Amino acid sequence: MTTTAITHIGSLVSNDPAVGDGSPLGLIENAAVVIDGDRIAWVGPTAQAPAADESFDAQGRAVIPGFVDSHSHLVFAGDRTQEFNARMSGRAYSAGGIRTTVAATRAASDAELEANLVRHLAEARRQGTTTFETKSGYGLTVADEARALRIAAAHTEEVTYLGAHIVSPDFAEDPAGYVDLVTGEMLTACAPYARWVDVFCEKGAFDGDQARAILTAGAAAGLIPRVHANQLSYGPGVQLAVELEAASADHCTHLTDADVDALAQAADTTVATLLPGAEFSTRAQWPDARRLIDAGATVALSTDCNPGSSYTSSMPFCIALAVRDMRMTPDEALWAATAGGARALRRTDIGTLTPGARADLALLDAPSHVHLAYRPGVPLVSGVWQKGLRAH
């Protein structure tokens, strides 16, 4: 295998206190990284770097782990420009707008859905994302949900069955019948393509009892639970996620003290994944990341990229929002967008730059990761290595 040394890194974020300065980011100044195949072989000071077949001079720029986007909805067709325009003109956001995307997605061909997915993945990669999770949820029939997952599985190992996004319009008068479909025939068709099962536990979508039935059935089929929890209102989603040992409770916007305590106590099991793009795009209340972190919860950041409530693929943008409006420090936000996302996907091979980890990293056109929040909106990612290969 060819080895590559990236040298003269001004500031390297390893996310491993043991190999760096002892901080959670494990910072190493004037650093080098040696890549062997698709793995990190060595990290440390440039002066001590072992010889490699090829070299790349970072010229004092910062290197960070590739972003881990642990919550997205990328198998869809169409957009919801008119809905966004109306919302910015004063209309409130509700879960019902999803039906617009369902209609467009059902009408699209497999080739159209895959082309749209690939376009968004390339867009995210240019901004430093090297791992992404994505969901079904815009088909809501057995055939459409299964094909969405099949298409997604060709591009990522982190695929989530979200037949329980909303009650299908076909079952508007029979939500119990739709839950039976989601936990029965649809689950059977979709489980072979997915690693995770998710449910939108919210008013206008699925209540606590329905969500429990869906997640329990998914777990029995070998899928690991995740939960859209407490986005639009207070509700049972977070408590259900913790009870069922879900990998993540996502959104976490409206939390009681008991919810925060539950997430803190389950910090090793259930990650609180915050999605500030959704609050930005809906002018909603921001999640209080400071409250969760201070309580001891594990926090991740993700884009929630979808055509309705958060049409952004930019993790740097979400980092800037988290620092400005969710009271996170730049260090905390970067950790949450890398190592935190890896925790939400229960992965130990990504989100860090340490020997044995997957060689996923981003080169910033800046001397420090702090510039991601300090210079919001500026395209700072100037190079991306994914599985050891530089992306072009």
Image (cartoon, grey):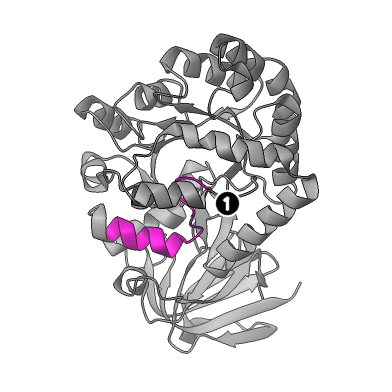
Q: Which quarter shows the C terminus?
A: bottom right
59, above or below 359, in the image: below
The amino acid type of the residue labelled 1 equals Phe
Q: Position of residue 348 (x, y in %)?
A: 53, 49
Write the start and end of the magenta stretch as one range. 304-323
Q: Position of residue 38 (x, y in %)?
A: 68, 64
Q: Position of residue 30 (x, y in %)?
A: 41, 83
Residue 207 falls within the magenta-colored stretch: no
Q: In this orientation, which residue lies closer to the viewer: 54 or 295?
A: 295
User: Does the rendering let one see residue 334?
Assistant: no
Dot 1: element: strand
Q: In this orientation, which residue lies closer to the viewer: 95 or 15?
A: 95
10, above or below 200, in the image: below
Q: Residues within 10 Å of mark 1 (few under 14, many from 20)?
A: many
Residue at 47% x, 32% y: name it: 96
User: Does the rendering let one see residue 178?
Assistant: yes
Residue 310 falls within the magenta-colored stretch: yes
In the drawing, does residue 48 fall left or right of residue 92?
right
In the drawing, does residue 34 fall left or right of residue 304?
right
Residue 151 position by quadrant: top right
The residue identified by callout 1 is 132
Q: Which quarter shows the N terminus?
A: bottom right
189, above or below 129, in the image: above
Residue 45 position by quadrant: bottom left
Q: Position of residue 39 (x, y in %)?
A: 64, 63
Residue at 68% x, 15% y: name it: 184
Residue at 50% x, 52% y: name it: 81
Residue at 42% x, 16% y: name it: 208
In the drawing, does residue 18 fall left or right of residue 363?
left
Instruction: Count every numbered label the image shows and give the total.
Output: 1
